[in-house]
Amino acid sequence: MSNSPHQSRFAPAKLSAFPVFMRVEDREVVIVGGGDEALAKARLLVQSAATIRIIAARPTRELEAFAKEGSATIAREAYRAGHVEGAVLVFAATGDEALDRRVVADARRAGIAANAVDRPELCDFFTPALVNRAPVAVAIGTEGAGPVLAQMIRARIDRMLPPSLGRLAELAAGYREAAERLLPKGAARRTFWKAFFGGAAARAVEAGDLDAAGEAADVLLAARGKAAGHVALVGAGPGSEDLITLRAHRLLMEADTIVHDALVPEAVIALGRRDAERIAAGKRKGCHSKSQDEINALLVKLARDGKRVVRLKSGDPLVFGRAGEEMAALRAAGVSYEVVPGVTSAFAAAADFELPLTLRGVSSSLVLTTGHDLKGASLPDWARLAIDGATVAVYMGRSNAAEVASRLADAGLSPDTAVAIVENASLPGRRLLHGTLADLPALADRTELTGPVMTLIGDAVAGANFAHSRPLAAARPAKAAPQFERTLP
């Protein structure tokens, strides 16, 4: 068979260094060197149960302090070949190429694998970037070609794995024998372990309740791996997919079903598993595809069917997200649930405008409200706070902007009070407008604003950066002028 250029181009690359996990508990690892390179390797190795011995005639103060903590011992003497005897691994970290070569040669003669720091051509093995969730470990290596790349990958994986994963793995080890004894090999065991690592036991470990975790594992084992469903009410943030929390991302990756509102962008929904069922719940002005009662019933049914459900809501689920009704329905049905907060739109809008929501000596309180609160015959209690200097964040307030302005002005708020408006907060195509309370009625005429609008009102708003916003009261051109719109990536 010919080996054409096309075949070699697309053939899978072969590793020149095969990754393994070596037992080092109660075994000695020798580091030769007394500077920063030696200290870096010692800090990496202290995450293991190895005994660390450092050979350094003149160790730095930082290295000595590290050793005094009980993490390592230091032999303060010049290196000689006998120093590597009995070690399981050797690191040459002297910064002197000739001496590093000598250390590696001595280790190889003794049959010990050696690593020379920053000298990949001398290395028998490479130290990985490590994600430590002992006893779970993820090691990332680039065969010495790109340590910075390895660290970048490590950071991404580190964010994905919950800190409690190691404790969960330790709990799982205690159930391995029982699972093998009580559950037939194959699908039943896989179902059990999938539910164990993604269900009630895992949630209890993450909450720090190991007793509850054990009880949940016992129930799961008795049920032969058939797990009860669970609903997570998750805040999707204001729109940008990189503003969701790490926990929200993990839950999306684990969800069997994602029930999402219309305001949640596709980029956020796409962070979930590709094979997850997606159900649009609507909940947008003028296009409600499901009533709230229907959504409540759907969440209960999915959970009773054993599904792991993410109820994905724009912003924070507890801020105008009707989460209270859904939690009440889930409680009444005996369905387990949790709430994962998100960045609410008021905070994203303030960040877009670089404005302080509270400002010492100007505003010490914040009101989150909707324009509908000002439609009644009497002013709500928070209106007095606005008069006293609170910053007011009005959600979805474009259509009733005139009424909001009128009622606040009637209550005594100065018509010169600063106003900032953001459409599609946090997204690349966001639009920013600024003005005063007297200008606010003009917002209702801004029909080009088709995305969600957040209005911020108060004296603290005057501290915003208006360099990239347009005047609210200016005559609207036939076509929006992009040079005045803030469309940062």
Image: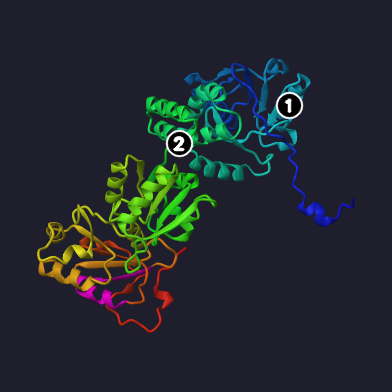
Vertical placement of residue 259 versus 187, above or below: below
The amino acid type of the residue labelled 2 equals: Ala
Residue at image position (20%, 62%) is 459
C-alpha separation, residue under disc 2 versus residue under disc 1: 53 Å
Badge 2 element: loop
Residue 443 magenta: yes
Q: In screen coordinates, is 461 left or right of 196?
A: left
114 left or right of 367 in image: right
Mark nearer the N terminus (2 vs 1): 1
Q: How many neighbours does mark 2 have within 10 angstroms: few (below 14), some (14-19), or many (20 or more)?
A: many
Q: Amino acid at mark 1?
A: Val
Mark 2 — residue? 227
**Residue 131: percent from the left, percent from the top?**
54, 35
Please name the residue that numbered disc 1 is placed on: 104
Picture coordinates of residue 332, whole percent (x, y): 28, 42
Q: Is residue 316 visible?
A: no
Q: Few, some or many C-alpha atoms within 10 Å of disc 1 (few <14, some 14-19, many ≥20)? A: many
Is residue 255 something that shows in the picture?
A: yes
x, y percent for residue 210: 40, 26
Residue at (59, 26) in percent of width and height: 34
Give the image quarter of residue 114.
top right
* Front label number (2 vs 1): 2
The image shows residue 97 at horizontal and vertical percentages of 71, 33
Q: Residue pushed farthest bottom?
A: 478
Give yes or no for residue 127 being in the magenta stretch. no
Q: Which residues are magenta?
A: 431-446
Note whether 228 is above or below 315 in the view shown. above
Q: Are marks 2 and 1 in contact (CB under 8 Å)?
A: no
Label 1 element class? helix
